[in-house]
Amino acid sequence: MPNPLPERAQRAVFIGLVVALVAFGLYLSVGGFGGDDAGEEPVAEPSDSGPPPAGPDDTGGLSGLSTVAPSPIETTDEGDLDVFDWMPFSEEEFRAAGATARAFGEAYGTIDYTQSPESYYSSMEELATPEYADVLSEATRAGAFWEEMSGVEAVAEGRAEIETVRTFGEDSITFVVTVQSITETGDAEFDEELGEFAITVVRSGSRWRVFDFQPGDAGQFGEE
């Protein structure tokens, strides 16, 4: 019969068995032998924040389409188009603005040098805005040669013709105007000046008034 293990060895074996059993119990308590289910994450519960977006099968058609009958806009035949419907003023206002620009051009070219310079300015001041009327004496052609021209009894006749519309805004229109000034002296000597000018008129109540007047290549090209 073999000799039993010494008492110290028996104690060591017993303690080892106890440790193994404890470790095995801990392994089972944390999900051991659970297979592949142990690595899967829990599925989130659906929220009650609102219904899912509707798809084609939910509405019977494409998402976003309405069942209300459309209301087509009325269209105008090409022959019935009125271009003034596209502008911020009527045809009558447009004609009045052009008449003001043309009258100012004629006033600019009409000079009776036997009269005072103030009478020359006044004919244009009546057509201008108050602000522009204040600077007309500096912007007009009346100057140092007035006395010389009055000595030969010179009189200039002004003529003006609108060539084109350069630009327009809500309350302003800039016309390009050809201005002519034909001067005749007491000795039947003539002088003729011709040039293009940009004349900007602005709406002032029920009237149009001149806001700017410059040579055509230097005048306004927009609502400034």
Image: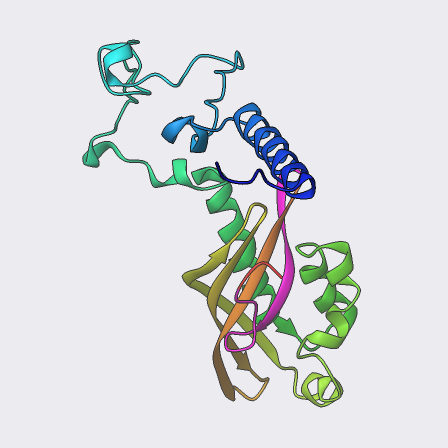
Residue 63 in sight: yes
| Closer to the camera in the image, 151 or 130 | 130
**Left or right: 224 in relation to 55:** right
Q: Position of residue 209 (x, y in %)?
A: 64, 52
| Closer to the camera in the image, 76 or 209 | 76
The vertical placement of 93 against 214, above or below, is above
Q: For the point 59% across and 84% down, which residue is it?
A: 186
Q: Position of residue 99 (x, y in %)?
A: 51, 51
**Residue 136 occupies which quadrant of the picture?**
bottom right
Q: Which residues are magenta?
A: 205-221
**Left or right: 8 in relation to 45:** right
| Closer to the camera in the image, 214 or 144 | 214
The vertical placement of 57 against 10, above or below, is above
The vertical placement of 217 against 126, above or below, is below
Q: For the point 47% across and 29% down, which residue is it?
A: 41
| Closer to the camera in the image, 45 or 20 | 20
**Residue 224 occupies which quadrant of the picture?**
bottom right
Residue 7 drawn in magenta: no
Residue 218 drawn in magenta: yes
The colour scheme used to paint the residues is: rainbow
Most extreme residue toward the front is 1
Q: Position of residue 94 (x, y in %)?
A: 47, 45
**Residue 114 occupies which quadrant of the picture?**
bottom right
Q: Position of residue 198 (x, y in %)?
A: 53, 68
